[in-house]
Image: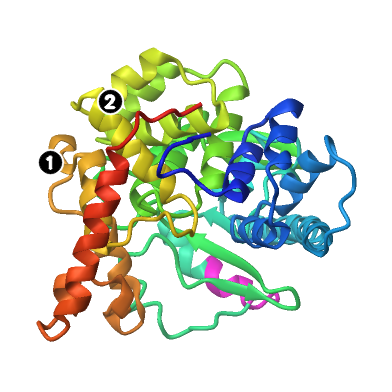
Amino acid sequence: MPRDPVSLSPEAQLLLLSAALSPGDAALRDALRVGIDWEKLRALAEYEKATSVLLRQIAAVGPDVGDEGYQKLRQSATMSTIHMLQLELLLHQTTDILGREEIDVILLKGAGLGYTAFPSFADRPMGDLDVLVRPHHAERAWSLLQTHGWTSPEPHAKAERFSGHQHLPRLLREPGAFRLEIHDNVLPEEHPFRFSTDTFWARAERVAAKGRTFLVPHPTHQLWHVCVHFAWSHAMQWGGWRTLRDSAAIIQRGGFDWTDFIEFAGRTQAATCCFWTLRLARHLAGADVPDSVLVSLRPPKSEFIIERLERHFVSNLFPSEARCPSVWLTHWLWEAGISPRWSGHGTARPWQVSGRWMAGSAAPESDRPESDRMDGRDITRRLRKIGAGVAYLRRLGAARYQSH
C-alpha cells in the first residue's frame, strides 16, 4: 500500500488489499489493527460492489466484530450474494430466450469473467449484465427481451441519446432493480483505438457452465477490454477495485499469452492504457505481470514522472479528500499518463464521450472544465481551486513513492 502524503485512508487501503486474489492473512490482520471505521468501509465497499469478497477475506482472519458498521457490512454482503445468484438465473433465462431466436451472445465484462477467471459467477460481483450481440440483431434482441419481463426506462431515447453508444438503452427487471445492457459494440464510436468488434467475434471461445455453453471473449481480449475500459472509458476514476481484481484473475488462469497481448495492445494503439492498468494491478493487487510486459507497453517517460503519475492515479481510485481537487488538472494528469499524441489517439478524450451521453447533451456543472463554468465573477473560487491544485501537485512530488 502507498504510504506517502497522498496515501489512501485505512479503509481504502483495506479495500484495495481485498482486491488481491490471495492478500495474505498477516497483511489483512495488519490492516485491521490500525482502527477501521466500519461504516466508512461498508459504504466504500458497496460503492465498489466488493462487500461479499471483502467480508469473506476479513472473516477468515479476524474475530466477529460487534460494531454496528461491521454488522451492516455483513448484511450488505449477504444481500450482494443473493443478488448475484438471482442475476445469474436471469442471465441464464436471457441467453435461453435469445438462443431460441438464434441470436448469438458473447458475455462481456463481469458476466464473462464469472465463468472464466473466477471460481464461480458469484465470486465476481457486478451491478449489471453486459452481453454483446451482432449489430443486425441488437434492436431485435432489445425489443424481444421487453416481451419477457425486461423494461426500458427511456424507450424513446435510443435513436438520439444512444447514437454512437456501444449499447442500447439499459433494460431493467423488477423486483430487484436488475440491469441488462445489450451491446452491439465493445466501445463507443468516438474511441481512438484501431479496433473492430469483429475481432472479438472471430476469436470468441466457448465455455461450459451450469449445463449451458456460453461464448466469452478470448483471454487476450478480456484483459485488453478490462484495461481499456478502466484506463480510457473510466479515465482511471471509478471501477478500480474490480479492474485490479479482474486483471489479476485473468492472468492467474495460467498459460496467458503475453506475446499475443503485447502485439494486440500495440497494434490497437492501447499500449499506454494497458500499461497503467497492469502496473496498478501488479503494485496494488499482486497481479503476476512480468517486468518485460510493462517495459514493452510503457510510455516514453522517466521513472520519476511515472511514479508521480501513479501516485495521482492511486489517490483517485476511490472517493476521498485525497482526490485531485480540479477537473481540469485531473484531465491534464490523465493526458500526461496516457500520452494521447504519442499513442496516436488524436483529439478523442473519454470525458468528451461521456459528456455527449448526458441528458440534454450537456454535462452537469460539476463535470465541465473550469473554463466552461467560470465567468470571471467568482475570482475567489478560481484562486482557491488554483491553490488547491498547486498544493496537490506538491504532494505528488514530495517523498519517494512506495507502491508496496
Residue 11 seen from this side? yes
Q: Which residues are magenta?
A: 141-150
Distance from disc 2 to disc 1, alpha carbons, whole Å, reads: 14 Å
Identified by mark 1, the residue type is Arg
For mark 1, does the 10 Å Cα neighbourhood hold few (<14), some (14 to 19), or many (20 or more) residues?
few
Q: Residue furthest left?
A: 376
**Where is residue 265 drawn, in percent x and y?**
32, 30
Residue linked to disc 2: 298
At x 9%, y 82%, the residue is: 376
At x 66%, y 31%, the residue is: 21
Report if residue 189 lies within the magenta region: no
At x 43%, y 86%, the residue is: 156
At x 59%, y 55%, the residue is: 48
For mark 2, does the 10 Å Cα neighbourhood hold few (<14), some (14 to 19), or many (20 or more) residues?
many
Identified by mark 2, the residue type is Arg
Q: Which badge, 2 or 1, is on the more N-terminal residue?
A: 2
Q: Nearer the viewer, residue 377 or 136?
A: 377
Residue linked to disc 1: 341
